[in-house]
């Protein structure tokens, strides 16, 4: 008798689930808001000196690179400043991201930084700030990936924005990834149809073959609206 009751209950729940998926969305349940569905990680370099730190939030993604003379501590402080400034830079009316760019301290060089902020609304866009040797890539759904930041060092932070559509992908990398794999191979891996997590796994596999000396950080985010 107990088995029959459980079977009936499971059947009822299955019917309810199917009707919920096919029918109109109940008005009292909120719809998922536009966001960055992201994953990321740092492949530790073979020389054993950590340099990269990163953060992933719903609308904020950033990586700071303390490679070279800046060091891991400088990168951590730069990223902490970005997180602290988040309330001021959030939203379409937020402050210019240039204020988040790290500056050199007394006797301490500035770390690299790549920062992206999602602005939602009728015309979603991605604002970005870039300093150093890392890079930000925009991979439009069905299109060819494009690096939106310049390679190499610049006198000041590079700022810009990119319009987004459902299914677009954005990738943020520290300089260790480009040095190890090259831009052509990265372009192929970013758009092979895999999920962000599967794409990260594949990048890790290829980095393990190359064994970069310094840290190599990859952050992969898909723009989703539902």
Image: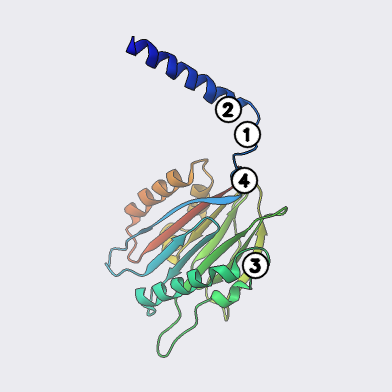
**Mark 3 Cα shell of 10 Å, populated few (<14), some (14-19), many (≥20):** some
Q: How far apart are marks 2 and 4 (CA)?
A: 19 Å
Q: Is residue 7 above or below residue 127?
A: above
Q: In front of the other: label 2 or label 4?
A: 2
Residue that label 2 marks: 20
Q: Residue at x 58, y 23 (%)?
A: 19
Among numbered discs 4 and 3, the one appearing first in the sequence: 3
Residue 181 vs residue 217, the one in the foreground? 217
Asked if the residues shown at circle 1 and circle 2 are in contact, with their CB atoms under 8 angstroms apart, the answer is yes
Residue 57 vs residue 101, the one in the foreground? 57
Q: What element carries label 4?
A: loop
Q: In which quarter of the image is the C terminus?
A: top right
Asked if the residues shown at circle 3 and circle 1 are in contact, with their CB atoms under 8 angstroms apart, the answer is no
Q: Is mark 3 on a helix, strand or loop?
A: strand
Count every numbered label the image shows and give the total: 4
Q: In front of the other: label 1 or label 4?
A: 1
Residue that label 4 marks: 225
Residue that label 3 marks: 160
Q: Is mark 1 on a helix, strand or loop?
A: loop
Spot occupied by residue 93 in the image (x, y as percentages of width and height): 68, 67
Q: In front of the other: label 1 or label 2?
A: 1
| Colour logic | rainbow
Q: How far apart are marks 4 and 3 (CA)?
A: 22 Å
**Numbered label attached to residue 143:** none
Left or right, 210 with respect to 131, comes to: left
Residue that label 1 marks: 26
């Amino acid at each position: 008798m107990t088995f029959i009751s459980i079977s009936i209950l499971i059947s009822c729940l299955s019917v309810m689930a199917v009707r919920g998926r096919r029918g109109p969305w109940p008005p009292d349940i909120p719809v998922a808001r536009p966001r960055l569905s992201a994953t990321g990680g740092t492949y530790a370099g073979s020389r054993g000196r950590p340099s990269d730190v990163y953060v992933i939030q719903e609308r904020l993604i950033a990586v700071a690179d303390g490679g070279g003379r800046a060091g891991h501590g400088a990168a951590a402080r730069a990223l902490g400043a970005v997180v602290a400034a988040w309330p001021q830079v959030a939203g379409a009316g937020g402050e210019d991201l240039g204020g988040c760019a790290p500056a050199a301290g007394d006797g301490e060089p500035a770390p690299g930084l790549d920062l992206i902020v999602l602005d939602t609304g009728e015309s979603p866009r991605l604002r970005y700030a870039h300093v150093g040797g890392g890079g930000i890539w925009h991979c439009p759904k069905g299109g060819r990936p494009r690096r939106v930041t310049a390679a190499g060092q610049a006198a000041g932070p590079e700022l810009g924005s990119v319009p987004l559509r459902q299914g677009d992908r954005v990738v943020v990398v520290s300089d260790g990834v480009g040095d190890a794999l090259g831009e052509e191979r990265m372009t192929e891996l970013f758009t092979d149809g895999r999920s962000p997590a599967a794409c990260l796994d594949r990048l890790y596999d290829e980095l393990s073959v190359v064994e970069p000396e310094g840290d190599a950080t990859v952050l992969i985010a898909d723009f989703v609206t539902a």
